[in-house]
Image: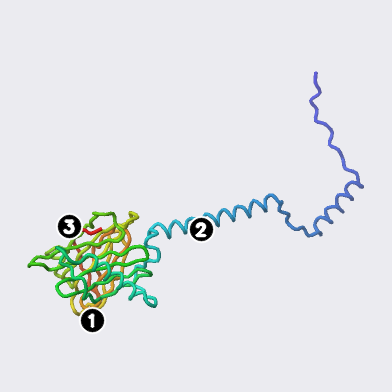
Amino acid sequence: MNNLAAPPVPEPSSNWMAGRRNGLVREIGTRHRPRVSRRLALSGVGALAVLGAATVAVLVAFAGAGVPNAFAGWSATPTTPTSGETASALAQCTSRLASSAGGRSGVPAGGWQAVLTDTRGPFTAMILRSPGATATCLSGPSFTTTQANAAQGGASQHVLSNGSATAGQAPAVSILGLGGSSSGPITQAAQSQLTTGGGQPYTFVQGQVAADVTGVTLALSNAANVQATVADGSFVAWWPGHATASSAHLTSASGVTTQQLAFIPLSPPTNPTP
C-alpha cells in the first residue's frame, strides 16, 4: 500500500535564519522609487494625446454644429461694427435695391436711407426707407439679400433680390397673427425664412414696437434666445437655421413683459429676382 504519511517539515538552520533576518532589515531600510515601465508610460502619453484630440474634435463639432460656415462669426447679440462696415453694407444694399428697381417692381432706384442697423460680427442687417417704399437688407461676406415693399397704383408689391439664392427660390414669409399675440408691445412683425446659395437656411424677423420699448429678446422654437436691435420704433433680429420666434421679452420703463408670437404664413413674393 502507498504510504500516506505527511512528509517531514524541514527545520531552518540558525545560519539561514540570521541571513534571512539581515536581508529583511536591508529591505526595510532601503527607499524604493516606483518603477513605471517605458511601455506603460508611452501608452499613458498616447492615451492623453488621444483624449486631447477627442476633446478638440468634440469642441469643434459643438462649435460648428449650430452655425454653418456661411454664418461664421454670427452672434446672438448685436456687436459693434468695425470701421467702414456699416458704410460698405449700405452700399451693397442700395446697389442691390437699385438692380431691382424699375419696371413693374415699383422699387425706387435711389433715395434709400437706413433707419435701423443691426451688426452681428461680419453681418449687417438694415431697415431702409425711401419715398413710397420700405426694404430690409442682410449683407454678409458672401451674400446680400434685400426684400422691398413698394406701393404702386394703390397696391403693395413685394420684391426679393437674393444675391446667393437659387434662381426663382422664394422665402417663406409669415406675419404676426391677429388676436392675443398682436395686443402686446409688438404691433406688427414679419418673419422670413430664406436659404443661401449654398443651401444654408436662416430666419429674419422685423417688426414695430411701442415707443417706450427699449429692448427686445426673441425666444426661439429651439430654446435659444436672440437679442434684437431696437431703434425708431422698429426691431430687427435674424439667426442661422429654421427655428422660428415663439415669444418675445420686451424691456421698457415699466419693466420686462413677455408677448407670445403666432405667425401666419403668406404666399411667396410675387416677383422674386435672382
Can you tell which of label 1 and label 3 is closer to the viewer? 3
| Mark 2 crowdedness (10 Å alpha carbons): few <14, some 14-19, many ≥20 | few
For the residues labelled 2 and 1, the Cα–Cα distance comes to 45 Å
Q: Amino acid at mark 2?
A: Val
Q: Secondary structure at mark 2?
A: helix
The percent coordinates of residue 42 (x first, y second) are 67, 52
Q: Quadrant of the N terminus?
A: top right
| Mark 3 crowdedness (10 Å alpha carbons): few <14, some 14-19, many ≥20 | some
In the picture, measured across the screen, residue 121 lies left or right of residue 110, that is right
Q: Residue at x 73, y 54 (%)?
A: 35
Q: Residue at x 18, y 59 (%)?
A: 271
For the residues labelled 1 and 3, the Cα–Cα distance comes to 33 Å
Please report whichever mark, 2 or 3, sits nearer to the chain's N-terminal start: 2
Which image quadrant for residue 235?
bottom left
Q: Secondary structure at mark 1?
A: loop
Can you tell which of label 2 and label 1 is closer to the viewer? 2
Q: Could you say which disc has been placed on residue 56 in the image?
A: 2
Q: Foreground: 155 or 191?
A: 155
Q: Could you say which disc has been placed on residue 265 in the image?
A: 3
The percent coordinates of residue 40 (x first, y second) are 67, 50
Q: Which residue is mark 1?
A: 253
In the picture, measured across the screen, residue 34 lies left or right of residue 61, that is right
Q: Amino acid at mark 3?
A: Pro
Figure check: 209 above or below 50: below
Its colouring scheme is rainbow
Q: Could you say which disc has been placed on residue 8 in the image?
A: none
Q: Residue at x 16, y 56 (%)?
A: 267
Figure check: 61 above or below 125: above
Which image quadrant for residue 51?
bottom right
